[in-house]
Image (cartoon, coloured by chain):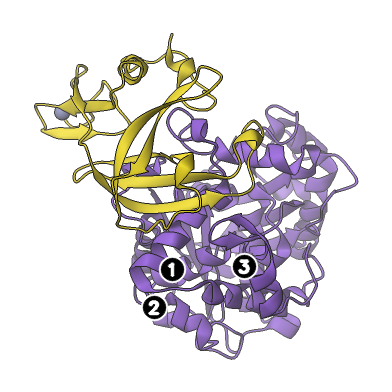
Amino acid sequence: MPDKDVAVIGVGQSAFVRGYPGGIRELCFEAYREAMQDAGIPSKEIKALIVCCAPEYDKQRSPSSLIDEYLGLTPAPAFMVESLCSSSTTGFAIAYSFIKSGLYDVVCVLGFQKMSEITSQDVQERMGRGADVMWESPYGTSMPAYYAMYAQAHFANFGTKPDDLALVRVKASTYGQLNEKAVYRKKVTFEQVMESGLVSSPLKVMDCCANADGSSCVILASADRAKEFSKKPVWVMGVGQSNAPMNLASREHMRGLECARIAGEKAYAMAGVGPHDIDVAEVHDCFTIAEILAYEALGFAKPGEGPQLIRDKETYLEGKIPVNVDGGLLSKGHPIGATGGSQLRTIVMQLRGEAGAIQAPNAEIGLVHNIGGVGIYGNVIILGR
Amino acid sequence: MGFEKFGRKSFTAITKVGEYVDKLESGQVFTTHCPKCNKTYFPPRMDCPGCLSGSLEWVKVPDTGKLVSFTNVKYAPTGFEGDLPYLLAVVDFDGFRMFGRLVSSMQGTDIKVGMTVKPVVVSYENGQIAHEFVAAE
Ligand SMILES: [Zn+2]
């Protein structure tokens, strides 16, 4: 049984869309409103606000202060955390420690990104600088290019094929069609993925998730406050974090993401569970290869055997470990700072038995794997009911 | 000054390892080594996290290395559109690894993980300079 010290008592998410028709403050309010209605608490109960986003997508500097004001949370202290695409699970880890330490009893973690303020090419330029700006970016780097090199290495080391990657996208679309908050809700066939154009070999257009605007909100509380407010608190069992060197050249191998493997080990150890105990998982599938790497990093498959899991459909709802049955980043879109909070929301709903058409059977323990940059930051969170 | 000449487009001008660019201009690819820790670093650096020394020495990169992985980029970030398509790679030199491009003449050739490549100095038409890698036959 998990230590019942810190619980999630409210979750919310905006629709993830191509171009949100409003400013960042309004975008943030969408997720906040849903999470506060879910938690059923007045705003005076929020003792601290952690805003999670990556810089340079919109013009607002120090956004946490503005958002604190717009949500009506001042004088509660607010600050921003950033770990690229894993910002909101980093915020979650800090919120956990705030509550565990007794400093605050209720904390709001709000992630957002409004990527549509700049062009898609400029987004790639920002992301390319989410790498070693001195020694890598001068060659013209981008997220697809980096993950493509991980894919190429996996192909060479383990015989993985483009077909295996396509199967991941087909699964994502199977569930993405059911998610009304997803940016991409069309059915995708195996042939469509295989016929889509190359972005950075071997990754094709349909191996990549879409940029999106979106926000997510997770409200955490101490055990006492959770019991006071919530009929279905979801408990934090494990929090694991790790970093790999930013520069690919400084990493020891390219067979998988070490930051994810180490974060997973830490989270499992803290929770006192192993891969076989996980009933449902959300992993960071910014690219199809990333989901296969996640299977292996988290121990759902042995190193090199991730492709077999998707070939056997073991990560579908009916399989032994349902993964990304909300459509994943590939369907939902990936508004950088909001992504981890969206993953947490899905797992919380699964553990409460409120996931509707995508409900995993008897989900008691769930896992979130959220990666910042190309395997730079690894966050793994394990939740239990 | 000096480092603004590194790569297709540099985002850094001042560094303690600016000599790297001087070495490239003389046709050589170097990196740094800590004699105390007997460790070679890439990217080159003047500070050793192992022994806290602040004066590492320049050493020549070996003549050949093995290709760890690569990609053929078809969609470029802002500022690199004119180079498309281009090849990015990680190369292992038995003790350290380097990041860079494979030379443009390798486009369309049979590139394989594990193949032997050698570092070369490439000058671009706008005066920029960088290390790249070429198949060693
Ligand atoms: Zn040293």
Chain letter of the residue beneath label 3 in the structure image: A
In which image quadrant can residue B129 be found?
A: top left
Q: Which secondary structure lies at badge 3?
A: helix
Tags 1 and 3 both on a single chain: yes
- Residue B59, given in percent of the width and then of the height, sits at 18, 25
Instruction: From the rendered image, report the letter of the chain displayed in yellow.
Output: B
Ligand 1 within 8 Å of the CB at mark 1: no
Q: Which residue is mark 2?
A: A305
Residue positioned 10% across, 26% down in the render? B35
- Residue A86, given in percent of the width and then of the height, sits at 55, 50
Q: Callout 2 environment at 10 Å: few (<14), some (14 to 19), or many (20+)?
A: some
> Looking at the image, is A348 positioned above or below residue A146?
below
- Mark 1: amino acid: Asp
- Depth check: A150 or A99 in front? A150
Instruction: From the rendered image, report the letter of the chain displayed in purple.
Output: A
Residue positioned 20% across, 36% down in the render? B62
> Looking at the image, is B19 positioned above or below residue A311?
above
Q: Which residue is mark 1?
A: A3
> Looking at the image, is A364 positioned above or below residue A228?
below
In front of the other: label 2 or label 1? 2
Quick check: A80 left or right of A137?
right
Query: Can residue A121 be seen?
Result: yes
Q: Which residue is mark 3?
A: A227
Chain letter of the residue beneath label 2 in the structure image: A
